[in-house]
Amino acid sequence: METVEKMQKINPLYLLLNIFGPFVVMVLAVVLGVMLPEQVGLILSILGFGLAVAWWGFLGRKFYDKTKGRTLAGLEETGFVPNHTFNADGCTVVVDLVHAQVALLFRWNPTKAYVRPASALSNVCVDDGRGGAGFLEGSSRVSFLFTVDGMKIRVNTFTSNKRWRMDSDYILTGISKADLMAETLVTAGAQAAK
């Protein structure tokens, strides 16, 4: 019997490097800047600080996107056919309807794609985030959810820092995307069961 690798949403080393790597570079640049002659030290300190800010601002995201692209390309080389791909902030879900499989790639573990048979997914549903009553009824998050390997996965199709009315285009678009992905996952699961 083949053992299935346990899913890991967070790779601790990758997370720590993203958080503290730029900070360490900045501190080293400042320390070297103090030890070196004034002009060279000042330039080195500014470069170290600039690199850290750039990493936290956009270079980390670019690195994630490149790593995710390489991981997904490697997935295709194994014969996985990506019929539907949904990219969210925390998770990328790729559905292969040909082989009835689902691949998951997590934001803080982009070097590993976890492939599971679609029949292993359970409790597939849409959460429109509806809350409040009367004219205060609305939502700030729409997502689709499922359980795989005993782990509950929530993939956001719309998030906001404010509450939107349920008839808002943002909410309706998020619900439409979530419905489509939930339906695709259920279809893939039905094909796997055949």
Image: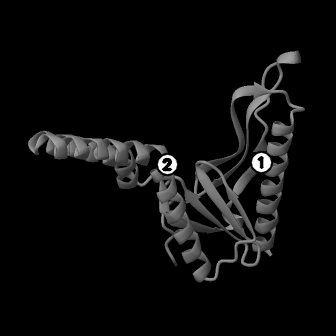
Residue found farthest to the front: 39
**What colouring style does the render use?**
one colour
Mark 2 Cα within 10 Å, few/some/many (few <14, many 20+)? few
The percent coordinates of residue 44 (x first, y second) are 23, 46
Q: How packed is label 1: few (under 14 Cα within 10 Å), some, or many (20 or more)? A: some
At x 86%, y 33%, the residue is 168
Secondary structure beneath dot 2 equals: helix
Q: Are marks 1 and 2 in contact (CB under 8 Å)?
A: no
Q: Earlier in the sequence, mark 1 or mark 2?
A: 2
Q: Is residue 131 above or below residue 26?
A: above
Against 136, is 48 above or below? below
Residue position for label 1: 125
Residue at 83%, 58% (x, y): give it. 183
Viewed as shown, does residue 50 lie left or right of 144?
left
- Drawn side of residue 143 relative to residue 23, left or right: right
Q: Secondary structure at mark 1?
A: strand
Instruction: Tell which tag, 1 or 2, sits nearer the viewer.
Output: 2
Relative to 170, 12 lies left or right: left
Rendered position, 133 above or below 52: above
Residue 149 position, x and y percent, is 58, 58
Q: In which quadrant of the rendered image does the C terminus lie? A: bottom right
Label number found at residue 58 = 2
Task: Give the image quarter of residue 128.
Answer: top right
Name the residue: 86% across, 40% down. Answer: 172
Q: Residue at x 69, y 37 (%)?
A: 159
**Mark 1 belongs to which amino acid?**
Cys
